[in-house]
Amino acid sequence: MGMTAILECRSVTKSFGALRAVNDITFSVQRNEVLGITGPNGAGKTTLFEVVSGFSRASSGTVHLGGEDITELAPHVICSRGMMRVFQSAAAFDTLTAWQNVYIGHAFSRRHPPLMSLLRITREDRASCLEALERVGLAHRANTRVAELPVLERKFLMIASALVSNPSILMLDEPVGGLTQDEIDQVFDLLTSLRKNGATIVVIEHVMRFMVKIADRVMVMHHGEMIFDGEPGRLARDETVRSIYLGEKEASRIAGAEERKR
């Protein structure tokens, strides 16, 4: 484990009865690194996210954030320690405006009752929300009701809601799921910009051409176990990954994408 690790998971296991959904997973995420986690459906990726972010208790093992053991902490406490998770569903309060939704994320990270906090928003709070919207290119949508936003903008809104508290690490669950190629490229551009400005990101994703472009390192899970942890360029050459997950056709596509990346 590196000295600059933001997140460290040590021998994390999560069992549901006799089923080990996550089995003895150890990894770390360094400051300003983008780690991609992928694998077949049912591999244990989301369960691992649930454990790391406090929504599910590990059966054994530990999770450390910035050197602090957060294994037993509740999700809202973990948020206040600097970890923000963006869910796949992009669920939001449709009747509120974009900036009000961002503020709810801000209040949650500070352990304030979000809806009650809407009654006492300071000028500084609003400025922070508008700045977060600016970072994802949604400043012009600040006063738009969320129900009116298209899918991509809702995804960006959820990222803004996480960024407003200046987290030490962002946890993104399938940020490009259901998007067109042009929209996927826009997500790539946003995450690249955040990375250049110092963000540390962990992302679950199935779209492999996106994954190999955005990630510094990729972890592949299968039946709760880690079967690969390394640079994206090695993915297509790994026989286990090719046979269990990618297949020859996708491996060839990834190899081509990696060549173009260079």
Image (cartoon, rainbow, N blue to C red):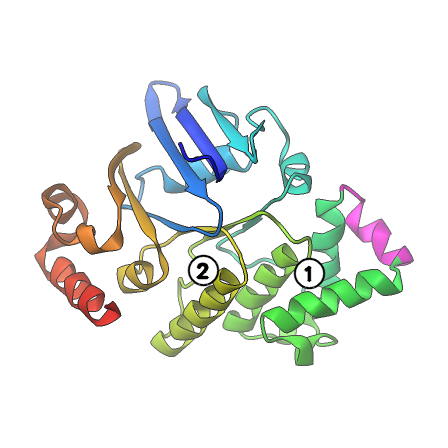
Q: Which residues are magenta?
A: 111-120
Residue 79 part of the magenta segment = no
Q: Position of residue 5 (x, y in %)?
A: 47, 38
What amino acid does circle 2 point to? Pro
Mark 1 sits on what residue? 93
Q: How crowded is the residue under tag 2: few (<14 C-alpha within 10 Å), some, or many (20+)?
A: many
What amino acid does circle 1 point to? Phe
109 displayed left or right of 9: right
Residue 96 seen from this side: no
- Looking at the rendering, which quadrant does residue 220 occupy? top left
Circles 1 and 2: CB distance less than 8 Å?
no
The image shows residue 227, relative to residue 135, as above or below, that is above
The residue lying toward the viewer, choosing from 219 and 248, is 219
Kind of element beneath mark 1 = loop
Residue 184 seen from this side: yes
Q: Quadrant of the N terminus?
A: top left
Q: At x 15% / y 54%, what residue is drawn?
A: 236
Q: Quadrant of the C terminus?
A: bottom left
130 displayed left or right of 9: right
The residue lying toward the viewer, choosing from 132 and 223, is 132
